[in-house]
Amino acid sequence: MCNVWGVELLKAYIFYLLLLVSLICCLLHFRSCNAVADAQTLLEEKEAAVEKLAISDYELRLAQEDILKLKSELQKKAENLNELNGIFLVFQDILIVFNFCY
């Protein structure tokens, strides 16, 4: 299950990086255009790109928090399982002793 969470985190990072690449491509496109866009349009597009980046960053942080919570839950379940295994071994030893008595 840890691999699944790692894959999800990797997907989030890839999405984040693709968004950054997209933003860089947009900026390069504007630089290479022969026609100069007006300042207001450029400002609006910049603000929209910054907003998209902020949203993606927030979603990435949420995904990371979810992964940490899931890892913590998995660790607790593993500890409980180890405890149950220990109890099972004690009972198994008791049964072995009990069988020798009879």
Image: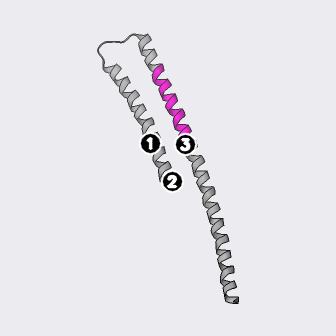
Residue 50 in the figure: left or right of residue 31: right
Relative to the observer, which residue lies in front, 45 or 4?
4
Q: Quadrant of the C terminus?
A: bottom right
Q: Residue furthest toward the left?
A: 34
Which of the two discs, 2 and 1, labels the residue nearer the N terminus?
2
Q: Write the residue at 56% across / 38% down.
A: 62
Label 1 packing within 10 angstroms: few (<14), some (14-19), many (20+): some
Q: Write the residue at 58% across / 42% down.
A: 65
- Picture coordinates of residue 7 (x, y %)? 45, 47
Asked if the residues shown at circle 3 and circle 1 are in contact, with their CB atoms under 8 angstroms apart, the answer is no
Asked if the residues shown at circle 3 and circle 2 are in contact, with their CB atoms under 8 angstroms apart, the answer is no
Is residue 59 inside the magenta stretch?
yes
Relative to the observer, which residue lies in front, 59 or 39?
59
Identify the secondary structure beneath mark 2: helix
Q: Write the residue at 66% across / 86% down.
A: 99
Relative to the observer, which residue lies in front, 23 or 59?
59
Q: Disc 2 to disc 1, how far (Cα)?
A: 14 Å
Residue marked by disc 1 = 11
What amino acid is found at the position of numbered circle 3 in the picture?
Answer: Gln
Rendered image quadrant of residue 77: bottom right
What amino acid is found at the position of numbered circle 1 in the picture?
Answer: Lys
Which of the two discs, 3 and 2, labels the residue nearer the N terminus?
2
Identify the secondary structure beneath mark 3: helix
Q: Disc 3 to disc 2, how far (Cα)?
A: 13 Å
Residue marked by disc 3 = 64
**Residue 2, numbered circle:** 2
- Residues drawn in magenta: 47-63
Q: Disc 3 to disc 1, how far (Cα)?
A: 11 Å
Is residue 58 inside the magenta stretch?
yes
Q: Write the residue at 30% across / 17% down.
A: 33
- Picture coordinates of residue 78 (x, y %)? 60, 60
Secondary structure mostly seen in the magenta stretch:
helix
